[in-house]
Image (tube, helix red, strand yellow):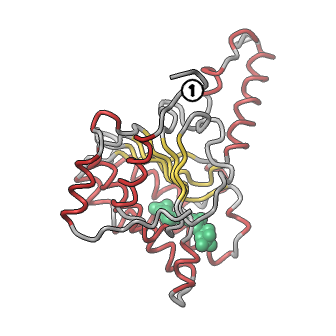
Amino acid sequence: MKNLFRPRLKQDQQNLTLSLDKNNIPEHVAIIMDGNGRWANRRGMPRIVGHQNGMKAVKRTTIAADELGIKYLTMYAFSTENWKRPKDEVDFLMKLPQEFLALEMDELVEKNVQVKMMGHTDALPKYTIAAMEEAVKRTENNTGLVLNFALNYGSRREITESLRTAVQEIASGTLQLEDLNEDWISSRLLTKGIPDPDLLIRTGGEIRLSNFMLWQLAYSEFWFTDVYWPEFSKEHLIAAVAEFQRRTRRYGGLT
Ligand code: FPP
């Protein structure tokens, strides 16, 4: 696995964009942003420098996705398992939304981007939630690309909680067993109102899902690259979309 393709000229970028089929752009792209730490280590820098540069890649990719006509971009920023990391690193990651708001938001607001957040807010520090809520509020009337941050997100917990709600509602009589179906479950997940991803991208060379959107990715196309997240560029996004367009989606049926 490589996918390290990296043309350098602006002209190359334009030609690549033009080579895409405008009528087959994935509506929702979800990204597992991996490789921040290794990117920094390779440069002899602390891991947090990787996260800092990862934040810049978030803005760059959001703008690129918007330019390509993608409507929803979900970014895995912090998983329910990431608490196992050293406290310093967790603290740094928890402060990133504030920094993002201060440094990167203006351009996204200008681009009509709408920020959303999905995750289990109970364990997050107040200042992290406040920064995310401010970003959400500042952009709530925007009508462009939806930038959905998965923050303290865990798919198994998300599904477990929807099952708990179902059991409670059935016990109290507000839900009939025969009405408990896939649509009901989808409507109780943290992605409520957002279509399932068409394309999943994971950077950093690992080929796994790491508890990310297990329900929602049932029929998504996957694209993996060795590129570390801080180096992810518009060219990589175009390469992923181009590969998506070469796939035939059958949803279990026949073409
Ligand atoms: C995985 O790389 C990355 C993360 C756990 C954090 C990702 C967060 C960002 C890119 C910034 C998000 C921005 C906002 C505004 C919330 P890793 O640290 O596991 O890398 P490694 O596998 O090389 O160690």
Q: What residue do we see at 45% from left, 50% from top? A: 133
Q: Which residue is mark 1?
A: 251
Identified at 56% across, 66% down, the residue is 204
The part of the image, by quadrant, that contains residue 159 is top right
Task: Return the residue found at the far front.
Answer: 255
**Regarding ligand 1, which quadrant of the image does it lie in?**
bottom right
52 relative to 10, above or below: below
Looking at the image, residue 254 sits to the left or right of residue 67; the answer is right
The furthest residue to the left: 11
Query: Is 155 left, or right, of 13 in this rendering?
Result: right
Q: Is residue 90 visible?
A: no
229 or 147, nearer to the observer: 229
Mark 1 crowd level (few <14, some 14–19, many ≥20, 10 Å Cα): few
Taking 218 as reference, is 16 above or below it?
Answer: below
Say which element carries label 1: loop
Expressed as whole percent of the image width and height from the top left, the position of residue 235 reads 34, 60
The N terminus lies in which quarter of the figure?
bottom right
Near-viewer residue (248 or 53): 248
Expressed as whole percent of the image width and height from the top left, the position of residue 95 reads 51, 69
Q: Is 176 displayed left or right of 149 in the figure?
A: right
- Residue at (76%, 12%) from the top-left corner? 177
Rendered image quadrant of residue 91: bottom right
Q: Examine the rendered structure and indicate whether residue 217 appears above or below residue 2.
A: above
Q: Residue furthest bottom?
A: 44
Q: Nearer the viewer, residue 235 or 152?
A: 235
* Residue 61 place in picture, x, y as percent: 37, 58
Please, what is the three-letter code of the amino acid marked with disc 1? Tyr
Q: Position of residue 188 (x, y in %)?
A: 62, 29
Whether residue 159 is visible here, answered yes or no, is yes
